[in-house]
Image (tube, rainbow, N blue to C red):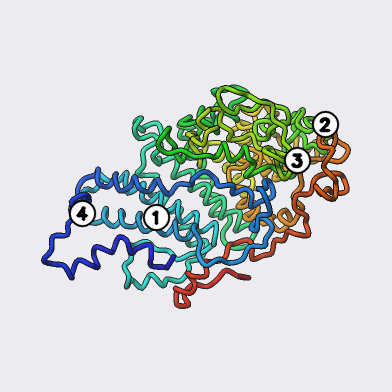
Amino acid sequence: MRRTQYIFTALLFILLAPGCKKLDLTPKDQVSDPSFWKKPSDFQLAANDFYYGLMQVPQYIDNTSDIAFGGGANNVSNGSFLPTANSEVWDNAFKWIRSTNYLLEKASASELGAEIDRWVGEAQFFRAYNYWNLVKTFGGVPKIDKVLDVSSPELYSQRSSQSEIIDFILADLESAAAKLPKQNELSEDDLGRVTQGAAQALRARAALYMGTWAKYHGSGDADKYLNIAIESAEAVYNSGVYGLYTDKAENSYKYFFILQGDDSREVILARRYYQNRVVHNWTRELWFNYMVPTKNMADLYLAKDGLPIGQSPEFQGYATLTSEFQNRDPRMAMTFIVPGSSIFFEGDIWQPTFPGFSGTNATQTGYMIRKFLDETTDAAQFRGQYDFKEIRYAEVLLILAEALYEKNGSISDGDLDRTINVIRSRAGMPALTNAFVSSNNLDMQTEIRRERTVELAFEGFRRDDLRRWKTAEQELVKSIRGVKFVGTEYQQKYPDLQVGTDIQVDNNGFIITEAASSRQFMPKHYLFPIPLQQIQLSKGTLEQNQGW
C-alpha cells in the first residue's frame, strides 16, 4: 500500500467535486460529511467502526516463538524471513489511525463539548491501540496526529523514536481513561465497548513493554515506564470492577476462554462474535493442529508441589502417554490435550483423542492444544461464537507483579498474594513466596516470567516477551522439540514410525521438530523491517531498521 493510499477513499469526493459544481452529487443512500457530525450519536456511529480493527483471534502468533509450532517451518520463528514490500500491520494500523484522527478533528471543531467526550475517548484509545501494534512490531514509526491530504508534508515524516511513540500512546490512553465509563457503568447494549479499565490496562501493557525494553536493551528511562505500568495496573486493581472468572470452580481456566467466559468480570476488552452473524473457525482449526505446543512450553508447567519438574519428586517422567501430565499444574491439562481424554466433537459426542503423527490428529510435536476448544456443535461446524479476550484481568495482575519486581529488584509476599497468588489459587497451585524461592534455590524473576508464560499461553504474548526481556537470542535459537518418543508408550503405539526416517529425535529420544541448525536469531530480529515500499515512497525520509 502506498504511503498516501489510506487517505484516498475519504478524499475522493472532495477531489472530484470542484469539477462538477453544477451537479447535485449528494448521495441519496448515505449521509454526506457536511450533514454529519451534528449530534453525539453521529460521533458514536463513527466510533463504532473502530472496533473492526480489533484483533481477529490471535492468528497463531505464538507460532513465531518457542512455545508453539504450526504445520511446518515458520520463517519468523526460525529467523529466515526477509523484508517484504508491504505489511498488513503497517497498512491496517495507519488506516485506523487516520479514522481516529478524523473523528478527533471533527470533535475539536464541534460545539458539542462534553457531550461527545466518550467518543473522543474511544478515538484516543483506538489511536493508541493501533500505534501500539506498530511500535511493538517496528519500533519507531512516523507520528501522525492529524488528518492528511495528498499534499500534506507530514506524508514524508521521519520516524519518531520508539520511546516517543510509546509516550504518545501513554498520553492518549491517560486522556481516554478520564473520558471513558467504567465497566460496571455500561448498559447491556454497550457491553464490549472500551472502558476506563481497558485504557488503563493497555497503558500498563505498553509501559511494561517499554520499561523492560529500556532496562534490558539499555535505551531509555526504565523506571519512568515501570512506574507508569505500576500506576496504571494499580488503577485497574483498585477500581474493584474486575476479578478472575471462577464460575466453573477448578475448571474455570478452561471455560473462561470459550463461551462460558464471555462478558465475565475477567474480560476487560474482547473481540466479540455473534451467532449466525460474526463467527470464526478457531476451534476447528486447532483440532487440525494449526498451532501445537512444544516441549519448551510443556516443561514450563510446575509440578503440583510448586517446584520445576527437574527438582520435584512428584514428576512422573515420560514413560507413558500421560505420565508427564500427572501431578502437574492443572492448567497444563486445560491447555494441552492429555492423550486419551475425551474432547467434544459435535452432536453431544465426546471422543477420546490421541495426538498422533499422521492423519487427522497429526501434530509436528506430538502435543495438541486444549485451550480455546469450544464445546458446541456450532464451533465444530465452523461457526465459533466465543469472544477472543484480548485484554483480561489476569494479565493486569501479572503486569503489576512484574513491574514491581523489575523496578525494585524484589517483590514482597503481600504483593505476590494480591497478584500472582490470586492467579495460582484459581489454578489450584500453591502460593509463591520469597521463602519458598529461597529455600529451593529458585529465582524470583524466573518464576514471575514462568507464571506469565503459563497463564497467557497461546494468547500471542510470547515473542514480544522474549524480545523485551532480550532473551530471544538465547531461546529462539534452540531446537523445537516435542514428546519423548524413543523408549516410551508413544513408540509402542506407533511402531511403524522409523526413527531417523519418519521422525527425528535428539540423544534423549525427544522428537526434534526443527533442529537448532535451522534456527537463528540475530540482533536485527528484535524489530521487524519497515516495509520496502514505504521506504521507497518516503523519498528518503524513512530509515530502515538496523541490519535490514
Tag 4 or tag 1, which sits nearer the N-term?
4
**Which residue was labeled with disc 3?**
299
Tag 2 or tag 1, which sits nearer the N-term?
1
Query: Residue lying farthest bottom?
Result: 540
Labelled disc at residue 96:
1
Q: Residues within 10 Å of mark 4 (few under 14, many from 20)?
A: few
Query: Do callouts 4 and 3 mark residues in contact (Cβ within 8 Å)?
Result: no
**Which residue was labeled with disc 2?**
320
Q: Residues within 10 Å of mark 2 (few under 14, many from 20)?
A: some
Three-letter amino acid code of the residue under disc 1: Trp
* Label 1 vs label 4, nearer the camera: 4
- Helix, strand or loop status at disc 4: loop
Q: Residues within 10 Å of mark 3 (few under 14, many from 20)?
A: some
| Residue plotted at (35% across, 35% down) | 190
Three-letter amino acid code of the residue under disc 3: Asp
Q: CA–CA distance between discs 1 and 3?
A: 40 Å
Measuring from the top left, give residue 383's x and y in whole percent: 49, 35
- Above or below, 243 against 130 in this view is above
